[in-house]
């Protein structure tokens, strides 16, 4: 099963040098999740062949235009394409009012159920559970209430070693028990420990999305050990004063946070229009946290499915 | 002086095949005017090098999302770029409320004066006069109150034949009188008629913008003799029933209107996403009105400055 994060827009505040506004896709647990939806996100989804009909959940981190002005267009396009599947938008207070006013005044009636879940930005808490994932919101430190999102895979049922079932003639009930971690008692009373019956379990994967935020150390324990940390890096260190003033981060600060949180990989993004060349941002980050990459539009960053034993595997879809 | 019309978005309702949403630029009388502002218009302005800081007036034809969802992003970008020049938006009722709610909830304070002029869609009337132009709104026939816009050059002062001033030793007062059409009386009493003193005057140019509308014959006399008629052509004739149902036009109907209005040139646009190939639309229109062209994104359609005598000239900027 895929677990990948794809930025669609990497520009802060306004479009610049062909860079677009905030919009990101997480593919996880057979689902696609949309993270923020700046103006033009629906064009970017089309450009990169993202099947937007697969979105059941959209996450808007905060109420700045570069993170949500594209939502109304995406929703009305869903409507024009006769979407029927329900859609839930996790959003800060106010967004529902903005969307509903536009729906009302344009006479738009959506043919699907649209639900807004209002986010609280004052603690970490679980906002969603799917068969394979848990999603948490947690507070960031920006000029307006802003939440980060943590996506955490749930433990995947164990895979029984293929020949075991025939060898011991396992019943359906026994198979179910072994998959959940039970040992096996044979008719002669012998005990076979679970680890001799099952393949090494898959490591669960995780992703944290920190859209707009000042450097915030208290975030680190909330996302400890995350596989991919997307952390905004609006500015270079030479513009640290600007970062502080606007409640944004430098690339160096993003890297410091990644190191503190013991993240596996750091993806940068949300670059200021003052930088045509982004290599300086990457250098700053890599000096602190070597496994940093520049988020690029349409380029997925993947986490492979890996068994606890370290073996790369294929989680069945 | 330039007089040209440039579509930036030619797709109806939603983006398709790389075609963008409604946004158009008229360059006239040393000004740039923006006509409609669908999502992504600010990107298109950038792509085609339009100096958006030169807009003093924006015209929104009606309250369907594909014609205005890009306005809030453009306005906030103006703000971020520290625009100081006042801006007037001619718009249907409701748009001001939508923009103001988003400004309020995002905590945006614009550093320039933004004025909304609410349009009435029930008669033709003058909405703006600049030193060189008059602009009129007139009603279209769509599912929601919708206005067309007519841009009409004012009469340009006459140019005196260069050698005349020296030949007759004209005073400043005499020059001013001749430029406004007066004859000249020489000291010996002889009368020199104005047409012997001045170059043939420039023909005034005009442009009509009919964004979303069913076929509407009563529009023709309101825009009679227009140089460029932009008229939506959402559908082909084979989909005429759909056009009727949705209060849109076929390319054939756009051409019929152009013929009835004795337009000089017809520019088509607002193409339905059901057509990848647009050549059928053009063929239908040309069969009725040969001087029809497909509106293309970023391609200006110009009207040259032409003297009454037919001579192509250069109106001084």
Image: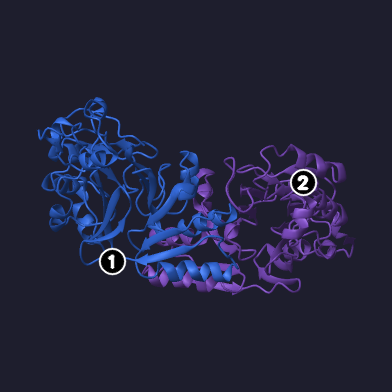
Chain colours: A blue, B purple
Quadrant housing residue A143: bottom left
Q: Decide which of B69, A176 is in the foreground and name it.
A: A176
Q: Is residue B207 above or below residue A271?
A: below
Judge if badges 1 and 2 mark residues of a common chain: no
Quadrant housing residue A246: bottom left
Q: Give the residue drawn at x 49%, y 60%.
A: A72
Measuring from the top left, give residue A225's x and y in whole percent: 15, 45
Q: Secondary structure at mark 1?
A: loop
Q: In the rendered image, is residue B156 in sight?
A: no
Quarter of the image that includes the C terminus of chain A: top left
Q: Decide which of B80, B61 is in the foreground and name it.
A: B61
Direction from residue B257 to residue B145 in the image, left or right: left
Q: In the rendered image, is residue B165 in sight?
A: yes
Q: Is residue B177 above or below residue A264?
A: below
Direction from residue B196 to residue A59 in the image, left or right: left
Quadrant housing residue A178: top left
Q: Mark 2 falls within which chain?
A: B
Which residue is labeled 2 in the image?
A: B236
Q: Decide which of A129, A194 is in the foreground and name it.
A: A194
Q: Secondary structure at mark 2?
A: loop
Quarter of the image that includes the N terminus of chain A: top left
Which residue is labeled 1 in the image?
A: A145
Q: Residue furthest right?
A: B190
Give the numbered dot on residue B147.
none
Q: Give the residue drawn at x 80%, y 61%.
A: B223
């Amino acid at each position: 099963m895929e677990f990948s994060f794809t930025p669609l827009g990497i520009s802060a505040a306004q479009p610049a040098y062909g860079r677009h506004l905030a919009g990101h896709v997480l593919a996880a647990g057979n689902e696609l999740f949309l993270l923020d939806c700046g103006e033009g996100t629906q064009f970017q989804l089309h450009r990169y062949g993202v099947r937007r009909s697969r979105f059941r959940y959209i996450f808007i981190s905060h109420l700045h235009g570069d993170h949500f002005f594209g939502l109304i267009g995406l929703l009305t396009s869903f409507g024009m394409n006769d979407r029927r599947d329900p859609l839930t938008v996790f959003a800060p207070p106010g967004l529902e009012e903005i969307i509903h006013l536009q729906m009302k005044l344009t006479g738009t009636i959506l043919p699907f159920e649209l639900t807004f879940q209002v986010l609280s930005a004052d603690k970490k808490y679980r906002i969603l559970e799917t068969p394979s994932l848990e999603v948490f919101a947690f507070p960031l430190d920006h000029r307006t209430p802003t939440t980060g999102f943590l996506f955490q895979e749930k433990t995947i049922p164990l895979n029984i070693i293929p020949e075991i079932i025939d060898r011991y003639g396992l019943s359906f009930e026994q198979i179910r028990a072994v998959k959940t971690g039970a040992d096996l008692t044979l008719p002669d009373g012998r005990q076979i420990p679970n680890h001799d019956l099952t393949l090494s379990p898959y490591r669960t994967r995780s992703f944290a999305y920190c859209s707009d935020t000042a450097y915030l150390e208290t975030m680190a324990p909330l996302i400890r050990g995350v596989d991919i940390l997307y952390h905004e890096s609006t500015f270079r260190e030479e513009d640290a004063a600007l970062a502080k003033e606007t409640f944004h981060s430098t690339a160096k600060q993003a890297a410091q946070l990644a190191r503190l949180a013991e993240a596996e990989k750091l993806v940068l993004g949300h670059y200021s229009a003052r930088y045509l060349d982004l290599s300086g941002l990457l250098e700053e980050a890599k000096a602190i946290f070597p496994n940093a990459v520049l988020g690029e539009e349409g380029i997925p960053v993947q986490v492979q499915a890996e068994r606890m034993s370290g073996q790369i595997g294929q989680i069945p879809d």
